[in-house]
Image (cartoon, rainbow, N blue to C red):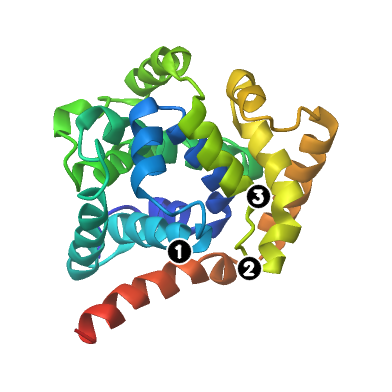
Amino acid sequence: MSDHSEAFRRYAADSSLVLGGLAAILLQLAHPVVARGVAQSSSFARDPLSRLRRTLAYVYAVHLGSPQQRVIAVQHVDSAHARVAGARDAGPQLWVTATLAHTGVQVHELLYGPLAADLAAETHAASGELGMSLQLPANAWPADRAAFDRYWDATLPTLEVGDDARAVAAELLAARAAPWWLRLALPAAREFTAVLLPPRLRDAYGLPDHPRRGRAVVQVARVLARVMPRRLRELPSRRLLDTLTDGAAGR
């Protein structure tokens, strides 16, 4: 198992952070190399749950898994990246890793309040492992949270929601192939995602600008996250890690 602190393990295992998943994807798509690779090589918009499971399994394995689970998850992701143009390049990998780190902290702070300073520092360092477990050079990850903020603030103005990003996002947001319960949750997910995105990107994707509704959705999510037992919030991480182990045993 990983040698992270118990506080970080609780942070990383909390499935409430998945509420930032759609915002992270839209931020990633605003990077032209990511958008082009996804548009040409990926079917994740047509099968969002499979994409979500693979991404979560990777994140949980890197942060919480055994050495065996981590190796399996890295092999799965690296194999998928081999078929996507630019996916192994340092620039796109850094941006994708940064979006996962940023939205995770953003959602946690919306639901539970600011991270303690030591946990925030550990979370930043651990987030870099998501990229460095693949091809991201160790020196590419910002050295500390202040450096990360500078990188984030410098990168946001360079993003552009182009035709590829809009096409993939439209398919993703329509969720035509998603189960009925996921389609029912889409209006709330759109509002929550609109809260997380910078206004310029929110508007470019055509997401709602309803501050009152957004605050209401965040408040509901905050209440649900705080009343849900910790064991239940951590169930997805345990299940997905088990699937990695079970898959290896079945080979």
Residue 66 is left or right of residue 237, and the answer is: left
Q: CA distance from mark 3 to mark 1?
A: 16 Å
Which element carries disc 1, helix, strand or loop? helix
Q: Residues within 10 Å of mark 1 (few under 14, many from 20)?
A: few
Viewer-nearest residue: 90 or 180: 180
| Residue 29 seen from this side | yes
Res 229 label: 2
Residue 174 is left or right of residue 125, and the answer is: right
Q: In x, y percent, where is residue 153? A: 44, 15
Q: Nearer the viewer, mark 2 or mark 1?
A: 1
Q: Earlier in the sequence, mark 2 or mark 3?
A: 3
Instruction: Kindly identify which residue carries mark 3.
Output: 174
Residue 216 is left or right of residue 159, and the answer is: right
| 201 is higher (above) or lower (below) than 48 | above
Q: Amino acid at mark 3?
A: Ala
Residue at horizontal 49%, vertical 24%?
A: 162
Instruction: Kindly identify which residue carries mark 1.
Output: 50
Q: Amino acid at mark 1?
A: Ser
Q: Amino acid at mark 2?
A: Pro
Residue at the extreme right: 212
Residue at horizontal 41%, vertical 34%?
A: 35
Q: In x, y percent, where is residue 79? A: 21, 57
Which element carries disc 2, helix, strand or loop? loop
Quadrant of the drawing holding the C terminus: bottom left
Q: CA distance from mark 2 to mark 3?
A: 31 Å
Residue at horizontal 64%, vertical 21%?
A: 199
Q: Nearer the viewer, mark 2 or mark 3?
A: 3
Q: In x, y percent, where is residue 65? A: 29, 65
Which quadrant holds residue 176? Answer: bottom right
Viewer-nearest residue: 202 or 146: 202
The reply to whether discs 3 and 1 touch (Cβ–Cβ < 8 Å) is: no
